[in-house]
Image (cartoon, rainbow, N blue to C red):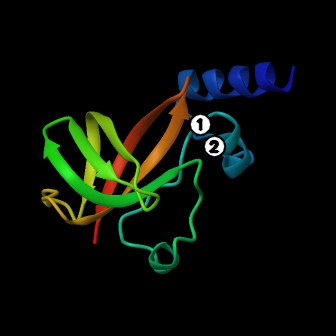
Amino acid sequence: MKRKVYTTLATLALLLGLSVTFAPSAFAQQYGYAQVYTTWQPGWDRYEYDRRHVILGSVVHFRPYRVTVERPDGNVQTIDLKPGTVIHPIGGTPHRGDRIAIYGYYSNGTFVANGLVLR
């Protein structure tokens, strides 16, 4: 029921050109929208981060719309990037060995990348 109310309010706000200002962080967490990062966060060096919305690691391979990352636990993961995925610093290109943070959200078991932050 609560989800229907949020969905209806968000739809009305979009149709009317209004901004959604009610409980943005709760709405974002519940419906898969991650925080936007533009710089490397200090806690990431200590591996303190929101594991539902951030993936840390080092770049194994990069090509347009796909990055392969080795995570701190040794697992290697390939993540598809969508049109509009932002790389910070703006204009940066991930290279093998770069430390990287990928922020986004999980949807049906797949990580959807909203942006990358290079260290």
- The amino acid sitting under disc 1 is Gly
- The amino acid sitting under disc 2 is Ala
| Location of residue 14 (image quadrant) | top right
Q: Relative to 64, is 49 above or below?
A: below
37 and 42: which is toward the camera: 42
User: Which one is closest to the eye, mark 2 or mark 1?
Assistant: 1
Image quadrant containing the C terminus? bottom left
Q: Residue at 64% of width from left, 33% of height from top?
A: 31
Q: Which mark, by number, is residue 32?
A: 1
Image quadrant containing the N terminus? top right
At label 2, counting other C-alpha atoms closer than 10 Å, the crowd grade (few under 14, some 14-19, many 20 or more) is: few
Q: Is residue 90 left or right of residue 11?
A: left
Q: Position of residue 111 (x, y in %)?
A: 45, 36
Q: Relative to 26, is 10 above or below?
A: above
Q: Residue furthest right?
A: 1
Secondary structure of the residue carrying tag 1 is loop
Q: Is residue 87 left or right of residue 70?
A: left
Dots 2, 1 in contact, CB < 8 A = yes
27 and 93: which is toward the camera: 93
Label 2, on which residue?
A: 28
Q: Which mark, by number, is residue 70?
A: none
Q: Position of residue 24 (x, y in %)?
A: 67, 48
**Distance in Å between CA atoms under marks 2 and 1:** 6 Å
